[in-house]
Amino acid sequence: MLVLRYYLWIAPPVLLAILLAFLWRRGFQKQSQSFVAYLVVQEIAYLAEFVVAIHHPFPAMTYGWTLLFGNAVSSIFELAVIYVLINRLLLTRFPSFATFRYVLGGLLAILVLVSAIISGTLSDVSVRFPINACHALDFAVSLVQVGMLLLFFMLNRVLRISWRNWVAGIALGFGVSACINLAGAVLRNYFGNPSIVAVDILEGTGFHICVVIWLVYFLLPERSFPVVDECLEKTELELWNHELEGVARQ
Amino acid sequence: MTLVVVFVLIGVLALIAIVAMARGHNQGGEDLDALARKLRPVDVRAFHNLMNEKEEDFLRENLSLREFRAVHCQRMLAAAEYVRCAAQNAGILVRLGEAARLSPDPEVVAAADRLLENAVRLRLQALQTVPLLYLAIIVPGLGHSRRVFFDAYDVMTRQVVLLGLRYPTHGMASAL
């Protein structure tokens, strides 16, 4: 079990570093600055946690605050990445559809309200227990992420909009991780200290799956869009003539 | 405990939904020829006829209440099927619009943008129209306002024909 915990603690940041190096080489930072920035922040947060954790004796309070600060900053970036995806695929692509903005704004307001109310009841948050604040934050951010990603996937499915592979990969990765974190946060809160190891493994596995999904989607060759030859078919011209004759008769 | 069960259930169901929808996205990469074969012709006049108030009044006056209910139910189900067909066609035209947007010709891009916007609008309208038509089975007359749905469909069909002037639509214009 200990080996698994260590593996889940070390493997995701290593894989993230590989992904970051791969994206940097491909110049991906120009395509999605927010995602690359998120990866950098996540790596820094891991590094800070690691440096604090290897100190002897283990500085529990410092580790708690480092974890809380790292989680807070990376959560902001996670939400920013999801917002950028939604903005790129829906809001800027169809600027005349005010409905999208209202639906997204309304859903966000409801999610923030619900997550604030429920995370307030979850843990005993105080300056002495920064880890508890971290769990409450995890729950709140996961709930907002799950809601936004469900809306994102549903709108794309309903409207039949096509996306590039990496967009699907980022959204799917965040989705898997957020769903597992959401369940993990409430389980940890209810079962308390005895469940911490099991929930840590569950959440670590979730994030590991998320990173693997990103790697697979970024390494896969991009699916090509249907390419058409630029010559018109005779039937199309005949149809147009027919339409034109109809208009002339009117 | 209830809260725990609810949120664990939400997490599991959301996970299943997200994975299923992402899988659906991966399976959607067909070429335009294959998509054109999936288009289903829609008889706009027949839909207008189904939504006609006078037609409905005529049936109400000449049939018993029981017969009218049965016929009206069939008519609304048929109308809903027409709307679903139109929405499916619009989904295929979204793909055509996206492909045409990659053209180097700015006029093609402009025509594709218009088509894309209308096709997406039509799919959104279909989302509102189908439930309303089902509701109209119980409350006759409720679906009358949705006649405009096929006006938008007509506009979209013309946009495909116009796009076809400069860009090969793989017979989509004639299949609509």
Image: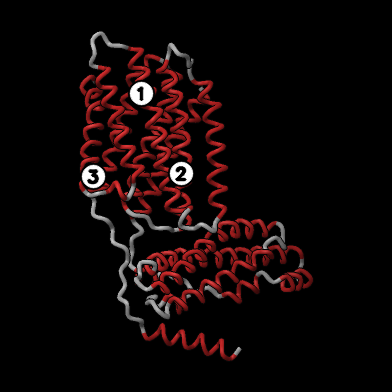
Q: Residue A199, which numbered label?
A: 1
Q: Earlier in the sequence, mark 2 or mark 3?
A: 3
Spot the residue most to the right: B61
Q: Label 2: which residue?
A: A150
* Whether marks 2 and 3 lie on the same chain: yes
Label 2 residue SS = helix
The residue located at (53%, 33%) in the rendering is A112
Query: Marks 2 and 3, how far apart in space?
Result: 29 Å
Q: Label 3: which residue?
A: A24
The residue located at (25%, 49%) in the rendering is A27
Q: Amino acid at mark 1?
A: Val
Q: Amino acid at mark 3?
A: Trp
Across and down, in percent, residue B138 comes to 69, 56
Across and down, in percent, residue B12 comes to 42, 35
Across and down, in percent, residue B55 comes to 72, 73
- Badge 3: chain ID: A
The residue located at (55%, 75%) in the rendering is B43
